[in-house]
Every structure is written in structure tokens, then in C-alpha cells.
Image (cartoon, coloured by chain):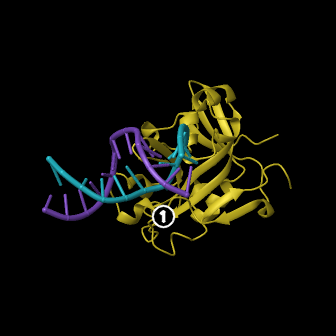
Chain colours: A yellow, B cyan, C purple
Amino acid sequence: MISTAHLNREFFNRSTLIVARELLGMRLVRVENEVRLSGIITETEAYIGEADLGCHAHVGLTPRTQVMYGSPGHAYVYFTYGMHWCLNFVTEPEGFPAAVLIRAIYPIEGLEIIASRRAPQPRRLWTNGPAKITKAINIHRPHNGLDLCNPNAEIYVEAGQLIADLSVTMSPRVGLNSVPEPWRSIPWRFRVTELFTA
DNA sequence: AGCACGATTAACT
DNA sequence: GTTAATCGTGCTC
């Protein structure tokens, strides 16, 4: 059986690259009106500190970026392109701004609700993008700053299956088209290529 | 107060 | 491959 343990704060209080890699195969859970919506995390990206010009925190501490400067294990939820929300998990010790963007999940629970919110898209396109996930499982502004390690949180992560290195591909992060090198091309995107094979 | 742009998506040629 | 949609954010005036 899959463990149902919530990941604790020490999981997130580590190198962002390690957290981004290890989140692959774990289960993102959204509890909405006592109903579980969930999926296996299959794609992440790391955003690490003010020096990373692809990271929102490169502008320093502002109202938008303050959650990233806070304690690890919290949700950083931001709004972009005038219509989309994206979910991140804050990493590393308090005071150092970093987070992991959740880019894709494989839906497991709440399939009917997810389907209704993502209609008329086919199943394989339900949650294969950061703003598709937040639309599918209803995550937006009120969740910014939420503590993922609170046992009663509406959003949290459960330990799941281990993903072998053989099944993980690292590549440049998506959408950083005007970000200077080396940040534009540094391979901080982690993707599961074969979810159910060894 | 005004401006340029964005860690995206869906629809279109 | 291209592009519209749509508005918060951070910067300049």
C-alpha cells in the first residue's frame, strides 16, 4: 500500500534540487469540502534564490515574493498572464527564497470533478501544465502561504512510489524566454518519463 | 498614474 | 508554427 504520511517540514528544508527530484512519484492532495482530489507528481522545476534570474525572488523581497522567504513547507501560489494560478512548494531554510513549481501530475482521485473542470479536454491534457493543475483541483490566491505540513491543510503531499533515476529526465525550465544565460538553460526541470515501469 | 511584461493555455493557420 | 486572452506586479515618471 502507499504510505499516507504527510511530508514533514524537514523534507522541504533541504536543497531545492533534491526536493524537486524527490517530489517525483509523490502524491499531491487537495481536500475540498472533505473530498480528496489527488495525483502523482510527474514534473517539477526548481527556482533557487535571488541570484537565479529565472526565479521571481530575483527582484528581492516584495509582497509577491515574501512567502518564498518564509519557512519551508508552505505553498507559494502566484498569478500570471492575467488569468492563471501556479502552485509551488517553498524550500530551504527560512530567509533563503526558493521553491519548487509543480508542473504536472497524473490524476488519481476525484477524476469526475477534475474532468468537469477541464472539459472538453481529453484526459491526457487535464493536468499536464502548472495552471491546468490549479484549475483542475481548484487552487488559487487564498492558498498562497498555506502550511502544507499542517495535518488539516487543504493541500499537502503524501509519500508515494520511488522513481528510479533511469525514469527521470532533467532539462531546461519552461517559459524563461527572456531570462539571461545560464539561468535560461540550466537543467532544473525534472520529469518522469516512465511512470509505471522500472 | 502609466507602462511593459509574464515560471500559461487554448485555439488557430 | 502563431497569437489572443487578461491583470497583478514592479518599475518609472
| Residue pictured at 56% horizontal, 39% vertical | A155
Q: Quadrant of the C terminus of chain A?
A: bottom right
Q: Is residue A71 left or right of residue C10?
A: right
| Residue pictured at 51% horizontal, 75% vertical | A182
* Residue A100 seen in the figure: yes
Q: Quadrant of the N terminus of chain A?
A: top right
Instruction: Quadrant for residue A29, please give it.
Output: top right
Q: Chain of mark 1?
A: A
Q: Nearer the viewer, residue A183 or A123?
A: A123
| Residue pictured at 61% horizontal, 26% vertical | A116
Q: Identify residue for label 1.
A: A177
What amino acid type is highlighted by mark number 1?
Asn
Q: Position of residue A83 (x, y in %)?
A: 43, 41
Q: Please give the count of numbered marks on the rendered protein.
A: 1
Up the image or down, A133 lies above or below A8; here it is above
Residue extending furthest toward the right:
A198
Q: Position of residue A159 (x, y in %)?
A: 71, 47
Q: Nearer the viewer, residue A174 or A113?
A: A174
